Amino acid sequence: MNKRVYFLMTVSFVVGMVELIIGGILDLIAEDLNVSLGSAGMLITIFSLTFAITAPILLVLTAKVERKRLALISLTVFLFGNILAVISPSYSILFIGRIISAASSSILIILCVVLAANIVEQKYRGRAIGIVSMGVSASLVLGVPIGLSLGNLFGWRAPFLMIVILTVISMIGVHFFMERVAARPVSSIKEQFLSLKDRKVFFAHLTIFLMLSGHAVLYAYLTPFVQVTMGLTENSISIVYLLFGLAAVSGGAFGGTMGDKFGNTRVILFFITIYAAMLLAISHTTSIVPLFIVVLILWGLMSWSVTPPMQSYLMDSAPETADMQISISNSALHFGIAFGSFIGGISIDQVGVEINPYIGGLIVVVAFLTMYISKKQKEKNKGLAAN
């Protein structure tokens, strides 16, 4: 395996980390910039929303640009967005910085996959893509505890300063160690939308959207939740995020193994059931710390265990547009984070953070229903094909 793949995994980790890195320090941002906690949460919402919308658009608009050159341009824009966050004197400037970072990171994640796939032999391409994807998933779950630790020690701007430094290192690495990769044709926006006409595919993507929506309703505001319901200190909150992160990172391998062994559809429905149950139950465990930890770990494990079997399910459901489906599922995932953090922010400002787990759990229950509809449509299509 080409060692540069691990460098690209690191780049994808750095880029992906920015999305949720402020999740644990929203209270610090809100206090410093004199905004509500819900408004601070909108910084996650706008990032995820921008990421989801711009990813397919920028992929089409930059289709003719050589990939290494495009990576360096995107990293430069990404760097500017995070410098803006570091020096932002107001909420509105920080908001703009988040938009810039999100747009550039949406294309960078795709470029890391493309570059990794092109610097290894054909037989190692699947493994190379998997390694880069691991960097992305790890960034989404570990970004919060990293941001929490740095933010509490040095202030909320410190995590962004770390990203700035790591981005500069990434730019140097891409410039000196990555080879030029020619641009390739990509599907148009219209073709991507048309693929959603298939009900089994549409409801599968809707399931991903709802799963991450339910997740983000609580996870984006986990710090205020445990502060209000458990009175945890900063050090204890860091441990909570660490336990969740370790479980979530393990979820990818666990979910893929279970999907191969028992079948993707069955495993997805089972995982969603456990996932919803943990979200609905977690509020009732806050007075019993050992039980809370068990529920937290199961929630973390399930949160990313669904992704591998779901991607396999999509590729099996629409093999002729498999690459496109993975791209759309990525957008659905980020739309879900945007919607969930938006709903969670409204909930905190209007009702209180204690209600967030119930809202998230109910959204995941709906995800079970959409997945069941997708499953039934797939079975119906197979029956028609057989006849």
Image: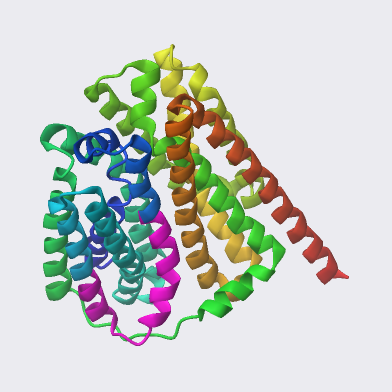
Q: Indicate left or right for 110 with 383 as reference.
A: left
Q: Which residue extends farthest right?
A: 387
Q: Give 103 or 142, whichever is nearer the viewer.
A: 103
Q: Quadrant of the C terminus?
A: bottom right
Q: Name the main secondary structure of what is drawn in magenta.
A: helix
Residue 57, relative to residue 372: is it above or below? below
Q: Give 164 or 204, whichever is nearer the viewer.
A: 164
Q: Is residue 151 magenta?
A: no
Where is residue 226? Give x, y as percent.
37, 23
Q: Residue at x 52, y 77 (%)?
A: 189
Q: Residue at x 22, y 24 (%)?
A: 235
The picture quadrant where one finds residue 34 is top left
How many numbered discs, if any? 0
Residue 340, relative to residue 4: is it above or below? above
Q: Residue at x 44, y 17 (%)?
A: 286
User: Is residue 254 in sight in this rendering?
Assistant: no
Which residues fall within the magenta stretch?
47-74
